[in-house]
Image: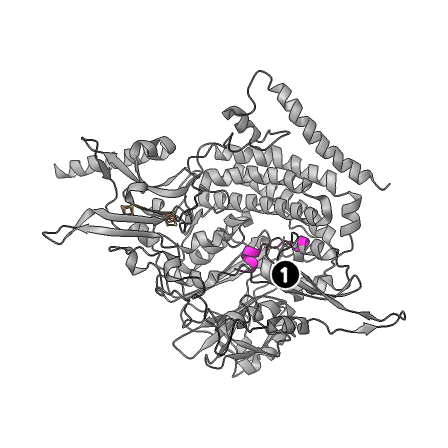
Amino acid sequence: MYGTGILKGLGVTLKHFVDTYIEDLRWLGRKRYGSPEGIAHRASKGSRGIFTVQYPEEKVPLPEEFRFIPFLVYDEGQEGEKILRCTSCGICAKVCPPQCIWIVRTTDPSTGRPIPDPAEYYIDADICMNCGLCAEYCPFDAIKMDHNYELASYKRMVFDKETLAKPAAYYESIRPINATAENAARAAKVAARAGKME
Amino acid sequence: MTTPTPTQTLDLAARFPGCVTPDERPGYSGWIVPANKLIEFAAALRDEFGYDLLSSVTGVDYFPEDRMEVVYHAYKTTGGAGLVFRTQTPRTSAEVPSLVSLYPGVELQERETWDLLGIKFNDHPDLRRILMWEGFSGHPLRKDWHEAYFEEEGKPFKNRWPVGKIIQAEDVNPFNDNIAYPPGFDAKKWIPEGDAALYGALAKYETSDETGLNTDHIVVNMGPQHPSTHGVFRVAVILDGENIVSLKPVMGYLHRNHEKIGERNTYLQNMPYTDRLDYLSSMSNNFGYALAVEKLINIAVPERADYIRIMMAELTRISNHCMALGALFNDLGTFFTPLIYLLEERELILDIFETVSGSRMMCNYFRFGGVARDLPEGTLEKIRGLAFERLPRKIDEVDRFLSENEIVRARCIGQGILTAEDAIKYSATGPLLRASGVPYDIRRADPYGIYDRFEFDVVVRQNGDIYDRYMLRLEEMRQSVRIIQQAVKGIPEGPIQTGKPQYQVRVPAGEVYGRIEGPKGELGFYILSTGKPNPWRYHVRAPSFINLTAFGPMCIGQKIADIVAILGSIDIVLGETDR
Ligand code: SF4
Ligand code: SF4
């Protein structure tokens, strides 16, 4: 009979609609909206009924590996000065696919030798394709991918060294697992070198 | 399972004494055929030796030598390795005979080669530009062609380090000054004669008066901005009443010369660019490209990485088919409901991609000799949950709700038929080919990775209509779930990368063609290396593009409203079609 297809189709939508409320009833007493558990449940294999997340009131939790425009990691010195980990070795500028990293190396004025500290460091954030290769191949854990994706702007975004610099503590907060592993590896390297010196 | 064909070494040199010679340059393989013997050679290949599927055609510019080559890759639909043959022609007057009469599937590819490399194909029925526009000057893939703001032949560019001079692309390449016109071309006075040529290439206007009425054929342009063309894509149709008399796809609106960019990039830098080809299945694109380069540098992949790759590729197939089916139903007029429900499953798959690679769609996850990183904790559990619990249930749901739906059946069964012979003739691959009754799946016909260890069926349907393409994709999703289930069970512990991760790979000189069974069809990468850090030639055999060759023939005789459904059933992504 003609028309059953349409009715059946509407039934599917209706079921989905009703499922949302059944699920709400099951969550009575717990927060299903605007809470991390609620969001996680809606994005899980057991999700039923409403599936969407009400951005910007709710935000999907980001996995550790999530990547957006890179930033430069700095450690804090004794007087609170910012010490960039970057040695201006240039690997990130070489590996960057759209070539949006510009680095000016510092040279010692007296000897003319390069100093491992960038004089200038730019990333053209509008050209950056968020590929993450710079962070992957930097040998000094000096450049990492950020989690901040809310960058919409009317202006052209060319980030300089100051804008790009973020503290190591921030890095550890967004990527705890990676940061711990890297810190351990660096500490082991330092220890190994110290061992060799003796 | 395909039975392995007995390996008989082809002695084509004996079949064509004195003219066809094996290619003995180091790193090359196949046969060199003189242009005047090309047609005869191709005919023998098809009719005597059974190479019925001419999969890929492309050109190579050997600048500064005065030589260009057209490279062909032919396969048998019964399976097995392929055959490469090439023909050489002087660069200054590049001309070779067209193979359209023997293998109509090369029509769009020959047009592309003409457009981008300036190699003329004699006797091609419709040799026009295809990706570039008529007022474009030159052939951009020729090595001496440079874009308006040209920096250097190869990356990395020298002025980034150690004294980086910041350049903003828009300052050096201002709008309006970035175009070079052919000599004598005045953009203000130009009347798009391309359109006249386009309509001329369609069937001629005719009046018919069988019924006593004088009717004129009319030309209708669908697109380039049209909700059912899945992107900026145009279809020029000649109609007799509501019936389609002739149809030509018009594309190139999203063209960015992926291949030229690829030839500037280093091998590794290309990986994230492949994500942007078919942006719905970036993991598969990565896979194909990684395979091709790995063949060249001859590097093995550790077992765990192989398993991860297969899981990712099959998840991609499912998410792609979710999109393809959802979009097809949109085109049939269901107005988003099935699409949005299918998107839920795709979202869950993209969540997995995001945890492993950091990005939902632009995954950039494969590396030469492995993958970028191991599965983070808990990911395997997530994949298991999807593969064993959720996806099978949801696929059955779609099947239950839609396969028997009267509107779906009425609009799909018997529409847009492509016979098996035609599908092969038009070099169709993937679901399009298999829905026409040809059991050709590269995962079985010419296995790559570790697909030979998995149990799954090559899904085939016999009628070659829209409905069969729908059913086939649904069944393929089930088979992909099967593969993922086996992979989740069998995945071993171990390293995920051979050797140390390197940002500069040394690629020996030579050529390679790597291909995979992508969700949309055969995705091939042809790479020619001269031993330098950047590939000399980098070509993508895009299934979305080549499957469109069959689009026109499939539509003839159908009603205009069926165009969108037929296009939806081919499943194209314009990022890959236009490259
Ligand atoms: S960020 Fe890393 S790779 Fe880039 S210059 Fe600094 S140290 Fe080298
Ligand atoms: S993320 Fe990729 S594109 Fe962006 S700066 Fe790093 S290497 Fe370049």
Give the camera-side residue of B427 and B362.
B362
The residue segment tinted magenta is: B568-579
State the image coordinates of residue B147 (x, y, percent, origin top left): 42, 67
Does A46 sit above or below residue B538? above
Q: Measuring 59% from the left and 76% from the top, which residue is drawn there?
A: B98
Q: Is residue B264 left or right of residue B226?
A: left
Residue B572 belongs to magenta span = yes
Which picture quadrant has residue B504? bottom left
Does A64 sit above or below residue B106? above
Does B435 sit above or below residue B495? below
Question: Which residue is labeled 1 in the image?
Answer: B234
Q: Can residue B428 be seen in this view?
A: no
Q: Is residue B23 left or right of residue A140?
A: right
Which picture quadrant has residue B76? bottom right
Q: Give amino acid for label 1.
A: Arg
Question: Which residue sits furthest right?
Answer: B212
